[in-house]
Amino acid sequence: MIIDVREPYEYEAGHVMGALNIPPAELMAGAKKLDGVAKDTELILYCKSGSRSNVAIQILRGMGFTNLVNGINAGQVEKRYL
Protein backbone atom coordinates (compact mmCIF):
# COMPACT_ATOMS: atom_id res chain seq x y z
CA MET A 1 0.00 0.00 0.00
CA ILE A 2 1.38 3.39 -0.99
CA ILE A 3 0.63 6.40 1.20
CA ASP A 4 1.25 10.01 0.24
CA VAL A 5 1.68 12.00 3.46
CA ARG A 6 1.70 15.42 1.82
CA GLU A 7 -1.11 17.92 2.28
CA PRO A 8 -4.24 17.48 0.12
CA TYR A 9 -3.38 20.41 -2.16
CA GLU A 10 0.02 18.81 -2.88
CA TYR A 11 -1.62 15.44 -3.55
CA GLU A 12 -4.15 17.03 -5.91
CA ALA A 13 -1.32 18.63 -7.89
CA GLY A 14 0.03 15.15 -8.68
CA HIS A 15 0.65 11.85 -6.94
CA VAL A 16 1.64 8.23 -7.46
CA MET A 17 -1.22 6.33 -9.10
CA GLY A 18 -3.20 4.48 -6.45
CA ALA A 19 -1.60 6.29 -3.50
CA LEU A 20 -3.78 7.01 -0.50
CA ASN A 21 -3.49 10.56 0.85
CA ILE A 22 -3.09 10.69 4.63
CA PRO A 23 -1.53 14.01 5.69
CA PRO A 24 0.24 14.36 9.06
CA ALA A 25 -2.79 15.81 10.88
CA GLU A 26 -4.87 12.75 9.92
CA LEU A 27 -2.08 10.42 11.01
CA MET A 28 -1.87 12.10 14.40
CA ALA A 29 -5.66 11.88 14.72
CA GLY A 30 -5.53 8.09 14.37
CA ALA A 31 -5.32 7.45 10.61
CA LYS A 32 -8.93 6.30 10.23
CA LYS A 33 -8.25 5.51 6.55
CA LEU A 34 -6.11 2.61 7.77
CA ASP A 35 -8.82 1.05 9.93
CA GLY A 36 -8.99 -2.62 9.02
CA VAL A 37 -5.51 -2.69 7.44
CA ALA A 38 -3.39 -5.48 8.94
CA LYS A 39 -0.55 -4.13 11.08
CA ASP A 40 2.01 -6.11 9.07
CA THR A 41 0.87 -4.79 5.66
CA GLU A 42 3.73 -3.17 3.77
CA LEU A 43 3.13 0.58 3.82
CA ILE A 44 5.32 2.66 1.51
CA LEU A 45 5.17 6.29 2.58
CA TYR A 46 6.38 9.30 0.64
CA CYS A 47 6.25 13.09 0.63
CA LYS A 48 8.43 15.63 -1.17
CA SER A 49 11.82 15.02 0.45
CA GLY A 50 11.39 12.03 2.77
CA SER A 51 11.20 14.13 5.94
CA ARG A 52 7.44 14.02 6.51
CA SER A 53 7.31 10.38 5.51
CA ASN A 54 9.98 9.61 8.11
CA VAL A 55 7.89 11.33 10.80
CA ALA A 56 4.80 9.46 9.53
CA ILE A 57 6.66 6.17 9.94
CA GLN A 58 7.31 6.99 13.59
CA ILE A 59 3.62 7.80 14.14
CA LEU A 60 2.48 4.60 12.43
CA ARG A 61 5.05 2.54 14.33
CA GLY A 62 3.53 3.92 17.52
CA MET A 63 0.13 2.71 16.29
CA GLY A 64 1.50 -0.81 15.90
CA PHE A 65 2.30 -0.95 12.19
CA THR A 66 5.46 -2.97 11.58
CA ASN A 67 6.22 -3.09 7.84
CA LEU A 68 7.01 0.55 7.03
CA VAL A 69 9.15 1.86 4.19
CA ASN A 70 10.24 5.45 3.53
CA GLY A 71 9.81 5.76 -0.24
CA ILE A 72 11.21 9.33 -0.06
CA ASN A 73 9.27 11.00 -2.93
CA ALA A 74 6.91 10.18 -5.81
CA GLY A 75 9.73 9.69 -8.32
CA GLN A 76 11.55 7.21 -6.10
CA VAL A 77 8.34 5.29 -5.34
CA GLU A 78 7.43 5.03 -9.02
CA LYS A 79 10.95 3.88 -9.91
CA ARG A 80 11.29 1.29 -7.13
CA TYR A 81 7.80 -0.01 -6.42
CA LEU A 82 5.66 0.29 -9.56
Image (tube, rainbow, N blue to C red):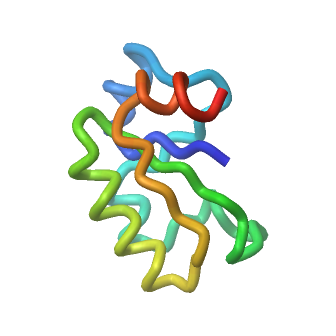
Q: Quadrant of residue 24?
A: bottom left
Left or right: 58 in relation to 21: left
Q: In the displayed image of the protein, which residue is found farthest to the front?
A: 80
Please tell me whether residue 74 is drawn above or below residue 40 in the rendered image: above
Left or right: 59 in relation to 19: left
**Residue positioned 55% across, 32% down in the render:** 80
Please tell me whether residue 25 is drawn above or below residue 58 in the rendered image: above
Residue 30 spot, x, y in % from top left:
49, 73
Q: In the displayed image of the protein, which residue is found farthest to the top?
A: 13
Please tell me whether residue 5 is drawn above or below residue 65 in the rendered image: above
Left or right: 63 in relation to 10: right
Counting every numbered tag in the picture gives: 0
**Residue positioned 53% across, 64% down in the render:** 68
Residue 21 spot, x, y in % from top left:
50, 41
**Residue positioned 23% across, 37% down in the render:** 49
**Residue positioned 60% across, 56% down in the render:** 43
Residue 5 spot, x, y in % from top left:
39, 46
Query: Is residue 73 or residue 12 the one in the foreground?
Result: 73
Q: In the rendered view of the protein, which quadrant contains the C terminus?
A: top right
